Structures are given as C-alpha cells and as structure tokens.
Image (tube, grey):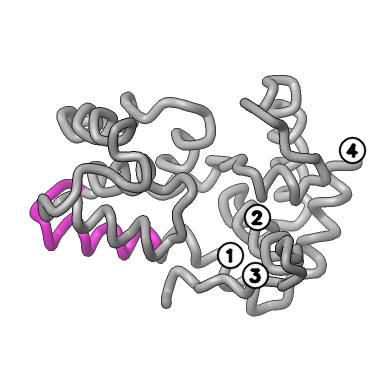
Amino acid sequence: MSSAEETLVSLYEKASPCVRRRGRAWYPEANRQLREIAERNNAPLSHAVAVFTIVSPAAQLVTALRWTDEIFAGERIGGRYPNDQAPRIEAACSTRYPVTRITGPKVNAFYRALMGDREALVLDRWAIRAAGHPLPRSEVPRTLRRELDAAYRAAARACGETVRAFQAIVWIVCRETTPTKAGRVPRLTDVTA
C-alpha cells in the first residue's frame, strides 16, 4: 500500500457515519439541485452541469449554484471570472455534448461525477491535500496525477466505496479538520443546505 493510499484510508476511517452519508450523497444531491435549475430554465441537465462546472472554481457551492441559475436566467454571463468563463459557457451550451468543451482533468472529472459517473475522480486542491501531498504551485504534474489516481482507486476499493463517494468523504474530512490561516476549523455547508 502506498503512503498516499494509507493516508486516504486513514482519513476515511476517521469519517463518522454522518460524514460518510454526506459524502455519498454529495454528488447525487448536487445533481438533483442542478436538475431543478435546468428544469426551471428549460435547459438540458448536461448544460446546467457544464455551466456549474465552469463557474465552480474559487466559489462556494451555494454561490456556484446561484450563479448557474442566474446565467440561465440571463442575469449574468459568468461566475467569478466572467471574461474567461463566458466564452467557455457559450461553447459548452452550444453543443449537445458539453463534456467535449469541458477541458482540464479536474473540471472534466467534476462534470462527469456530477452527471453520475461513479468512477470519476475529482483531484482538486483538497483531494490532493487529503492524499498527503502539498499543493503544487501550478498545474498538477501528470506523474503525481497518475499516482494519486491509483491511490484513490485502491483506497476506495479497500473501503468498499465508489471512487466518487470515497473522494467526497475524504474531501469532507480533510476540509473540515484543516484549520484556516486564522486557526478556525470550518464546518462546510452541506449541499442540502
């Protein structure tokens, strides 16, 4: 067992039954909320998930959901970075298969996980930190991405979870036990809030 895999399994074992339920429910509940946004705006779910995925970097969950709804309502053109995001949103919503326009390993995996792919692995800064690695200053090197992918998949199998649920569970444990710079340990708002 690699050290990353051991670290991940250890984090999983620290998860309370409540945290495990929250982690398993995170992606299905986000999908449900995005389905509501799509229906309210007469749009395909795939487009709502694409917009959400594009606006989600550096945004809280509830904020990204609100922005997604506002984009479909014509009240805004992007999230925190509209100049970058607006053309990407337009490209994704101009095709029946927006996943082809969602580039980058993290955001593409996030799109697939939100659409229901239980084997999609979202390696964001917290997922990398959960595996015991310091955050890279720029793009995650391919060798590290492959190493973490293997560690997450092996740890998920060892714990009897899907990759998507396992990642969400350890993400919650890591995020909710890591103090901020001010020393405060955050309690995240559930996707169901």
Mark 3 and mark 2 residues within 8 Å of each other at the beta carbon: no
Which segment is the magenta one?
30-44
Q: Which mark is residue 166?
A: 2
The amino acid pointed to by label 1 is: Gly
Q: CA distance from mark 2 to mark 4?
A: 17 Å
Residue at image coords 72%, 48%: 157
| Type of the residue with mark 4 | Ser
Query: Which picture quadrant has residue 82?
Result: top left
Q: Secondary structure at mark 4?
A: loop
Secondary structure at numbered mark 3 = helix
Residue highlighted by disc 1: 23
Disc 3 vs disc 4: Cβ atoms closer than 8 Å?
no
Please name the amino acid that badge 2 sits on. Phe
Helix, strand or loop at label 2? It is: helix
Q: For the residue marked with disc 3, what is the amino acid?
A: Arg
Q: Is residue 157 magenta?
A: no
In the picture, the disc for residue 20 is 3
Residue 186 percent across, percent down from the top left: 65, 71
Where residue 78 sits in the image (x, y, percent)?
27, 43
Which residue matches tag 4?
A: 2
Closer to the chain start, of discs 3 and 2, is 3
Which residue lies at the image location 53% right of the left edge and 40% below the top edge? 120
> In the image, what residue occupies the spot 15% across and 29% down?
94
Report how far apart the C-alphas of labels 1 and 3 lie in the structure: 5 Å
Asked if the residue under mark 3 is in contact with the one under mark 1, i.e. CB atoms within 8 Å, the reply is yes
What crowding class fits label 4: few (fewer than 14 Cα within 10 Å), some (14-19), or many (20 or more)? few
